[in-house]
Every structure is written in C-alpha cells, then in structure tokens.
Image: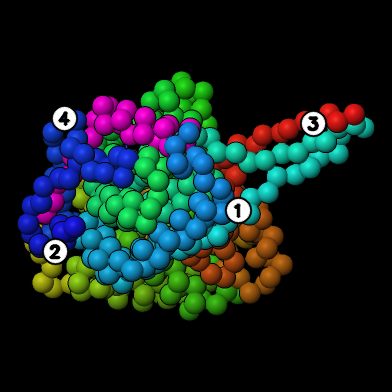
Amino acid sequence: MSLPISAPNATVSAKGVFIDNRWRPGASGRTVPVVAPAEGTVFAAIAAGDAADVDAAVRAARAAAEGGAWSRLGAAERGRLLGRLALAIADHAEELALLEARDTGKPMQQARNDIVAAAHYFEYYGGAADKVHGDTIPFLPGYFVTTEHVPYGVTAHVIPWNYPAQMFGRTVAPALAMGNACVLKPAEDACLTPLRLAELAAGIGLPEGALNVVPGLGEEAGAALSAHPDIDFLSFTGSPEVGTLIQTAAAKNHIGCTLELGGKSPHVVFGDADVALAATTIARTMVQNAGQTCSAGSRVLVERAAYDQVVTALADRFAKLVAGTPEMDRDLGPVINATQKRRIEGFFARAEEAGVPVLARGAVAAGVPEGGFFIAPRLYGPVPRGNELAQKEVFGPVLSVLPFDDEADAVRLANGTDYGLMAAVWSLDGNRALRVSRAIKAGQVYINSFGAGGGIELPFGGMKKSGHGREKGFAALHDVSQLRTTIFKHG
Ligand code: NAD
C-alpha cells in the first residue's frame, strides 16, 4: 500500500471506509480534507463516512460477534492475534510514526513513542485475554454459583485527534481481548494511523468484522454510530460537550458508556519538594503534545513560602521551550488546527487583558512553515483562582501557577474545578504527600513524578466531570465486558 506521507504535500485520494477487512468506498462519495498542522496545507483526504457506512460497519461487527469466525475463537487465540498485531505495529513503527507526525504535527520522537505505546497496548491486552477470571460464590446448600466476564457484543468507539494511534490501542485492544467486535470512529482531524492500524490488523489475520473503522465528521459518522440501535456499548474520549451527546445517545439505547472528558489536573508543590525535579517534569509533561493531552498537569499549586523559588525554576524551563516541525523534533509541535490555535490565543488575550502576569514565554523555531499552527508556550502566575486559566481546559501549551497557604488550602484548591482526572503531589514528607494525594478527587495521583498519558498497566479515568469508567490496566477489561452469574442447583 502506498502511504500519503510518502508524497509530501500531495493530496491523496480517500480509500474509503474499512469494513470486514476491506476498503470500500464511502456511501456518499464525499471526502474530508486532511491538513498537516505543521504546514497548514491539505495533504490527504479521508472518506466522509455517513449513517449508511456506520450501519454496514455495525452489521459486519454483529456478524463477527455472533456466529462469525471471531466469535468462535477462544480467549488464548484472541490473545495470540493481538500479540501478532503488536509485532506488526513494531515492524511498521517508522512508517506509522511518520504518518502520525504528519497528521498531528507532533515531534517525530513523540510520534515514535506513541507507536511504541500503541504496540504495547496490543501486547499487554493480548497477554491478558485469557487471564480474566470470574469467581465462585458460596451460596445455599446444593448450589454451585460462578461468575464470568462475557463480551458485550458490538462495541462502538469514538476517539479524539490528540493521540490517534495510542487512543486506538487504548480503546480497541481491551475490547477485542474480551471478544467484542468493534466499530471505531476516529477524529476527522487526525485519523490516518487508526486506518492504517486496521489494515495491519487485517494483515495479521484478525477475522472479518472484528474491527471496522468509519472515518468522517463527528456530527455525521460519530452521531450515527453513537445513536445506532444495534451497538451494545459506547466508549468516548473527547470534549465534555460531545460527551453529553454521547451519554444521551447511550441512554436512549439503554446501553453503557465510558466517558473520558479531559481535565484541569493540578501539581501540588510543597516547599520541601525536590524543586528542580518538579520544575523539569512539570514543564516537560505540560508541553507534551503541545499541551493537547487530557491528563496534562495544567495547574501548578505552590506553597506560598516556596512560590518564588518554584516560579523561578519553572520560568527557567519554560523560557527554553521551543515549538517546531515534526522533523525539527523540538519540545513541542504545532496545535492541531487553526480553530484550536485561535481558541488558545483567545485564552492568552483575555488573561493578559485581565492583568494576569506572563512569567515566561517559550519560542517558535525559526524556519517553521508560515501556515503552521505553532504557539509559543506560556507560563502565567499568579493566576486568580476564579480566572478561566485556572478553571478551564485550554488544551494548549500553557501552565498556570497559583499559590496556596497550607495543606487544607492546597486540597481545596486542587479540588476546586469541575474536573478530576489526574494530579501530582510533590513533597519529600511521605506522610503528607500520601495524605494530600488521598484527599484529591482524581482518578490517578502521582507522588513525586508525573506521566501525562503514561502507563498502560495503570487504570485511568475521571472522577467528577472528567467522566466515568476506566481504561488501561485490567480495569479496562472489566469495563468492556459484562458479568454473568450462573446459578447451578445440583441438589
Ligand atoms: P470533540 O469532542 O469534538 O471530538 C472528539 C471525537 O468526537 C471526534 O472523533 C469527533 O469527530 C467526535 N464527535 C464530534 N461531534 C460528535 C457528535 N455530535 N456525535 C458523536 N461524535 C462526535 O473534540 P474536539 O473538537 O476534537 O476538541 C475540542 C476540545 O475537546 C478540546 O479543546 C479539548 O478541550 C477537548 N478534548 C479532550 C480530549 C481528551 O482527551 N479528553 C481530546 C480531544 C479534545
């Protein structure tokens, strides 16, 4: 197969939708242009999948899940196939990384890391497929009771543009491991690697219909998939606004869903922290993916007595950050599109109009294409607690610093947004670090480290308005399967 990335600046024809291990033209014949964020120019096109394509994909998945070759495989065989896909991803790593970098604009090294992570998802869940055990439950005399985790059947997956390859692995690998057949709607802004990964899955012998991908617009393909009456479970990662639509669609069909809706994750830095380590980690992980990471630590809450020291260290790191093209491989790439760039710059303009001080600015590398969506990182502080920079998910390379007075104030501030996805506590007083970490309402809390998006083995998901359900780790396997209890009266 020839890849769009192999012909820089060329517009390639959409191959269509990927159903039953084959490309087929999208039903409408319409396409959506694909823009390279580092260049601001169209370099590919994808099919604008619609309700008819979604329906065909759901039918294919239903046939695979009920009676098809996929449904007849044992758990170990499913696991072996996922393991083979992990190896195929590793074999195509550089090709996939180039495609991911072109489609999203991220630095090449990060794109490479993302492909390694995508492969790891299939390796991990391939290994787990035959290790999800039920229980036996003591009951009345003469009874034997057991539980088992059974697949839903057809699972639907709507994913965002920020980590297309990783998101594909994160949501599809556990669903397949449990024996579901999947229909995936990747984001229109970046979906080339999910399409290529589906091709690779067909290539390693994944049975027809087990994995189907319908690219297209959210309001068209995404809405049709989430409202389809024959899906059994819905998994979504993206904005809170669309999350509401997804949960409403799931409610109308009386099916379950997991929602991962982003965050405003705090770093809580006490005066006794290793400030140098904290500052380096906080700055690096904040600009990862140009700040477009749901789990980004975008607020730094600092004990007032250490405020100047921490701010000086953070400003030093931030001033050195440079945005560049994927090939330049600098600290960050461009943001995903012109709308996001305008949206982020709107936050900057309003903050500065309100008098929020800029503590440091990074730079955009010389020589980047003029049309690219680059933004120099910014550090603001002290940010007033009610300011939108302290409350809203910006999804850009910007960090807000806020002082706190004592432990109780730190916890109040950490919990003082609608979100509850991630947090970090930085303190060398272990008792305090653990106490504070347990008082923060967040699905994951790091102590003296931080990994935005890291850790396939670690259950991940939101509290509060960051969403519900868990991905990653064995928790994901439980979320994409349902428990059946068998009660056997043997007398
Ligand atoms: P989005 O929620 O609009 O898009 C996410 C996915 O949902 C895409 O595949 C999109 O096509 C699909 N979608 C859009 N409308 C839909 C609909 N009506 N029905 C079904 N599916 C639909 O997110 P976005 O526009 O790409 O980004 C906007 C904001 O969302 C960002 O600024 C950021 O704050 C947040 N976001 C969060 C994450 C995250 O990981 N939590 C990821 C991306 C974006």
Q: Position of residue 457 (x, y in %)?
A: 55, 60
The amino acid sitting under disc 4 is Ser
- Residue at the (63%, 54%) spot, across then down: 131
* Tag 4 residue: 28
Residue 488: numbered disc:
3
Name the spot of residue 458 as percent of width and height, x first. Answer: 56, 58
Q: Is residue 214 visible in the rendered structure shown here?
A: yes
Give the residue at mark 2. Answer: 6
Assign the N terminus to one quadrant of the image.
Answer: bottom left
Q: Judge whether residue 42 is colored magenta.
A: yes
Task: State the CA–CA distance, disc 2 to disc 3.
Answer: 60 Å
| Callout 3 touching callout 1 (CB < 8 Å) | no
Q: Earlier in the sequence, mark 2 or mark 4?
A: 2
Observer-nearest of 48 and 438: 48
| N-term mark: 3 or 4 | 4
Tell me if mark 2 has few (under 14), some (14-19) or many (20+) residues whose alpha carbon lies within 10 angstroms of its own: few
- Magenta residues? 40-66
Above or below, 319 against 220 in this view is: below
User: Residue pushed farthest top?
Assistant: 252
Q: Is residue 356 left or right of residue 126?
A: left
Q: Is residue 327 above or below residue 257?
A: below
* Alpha-carbon span between mark 2 and mark 4: 27 Å
Q: Along the line of sight, which residue is nearer the eye, 265 or 400?
A: 265
Provide the secondary structure element on which disc 4 rests. Answer: loop
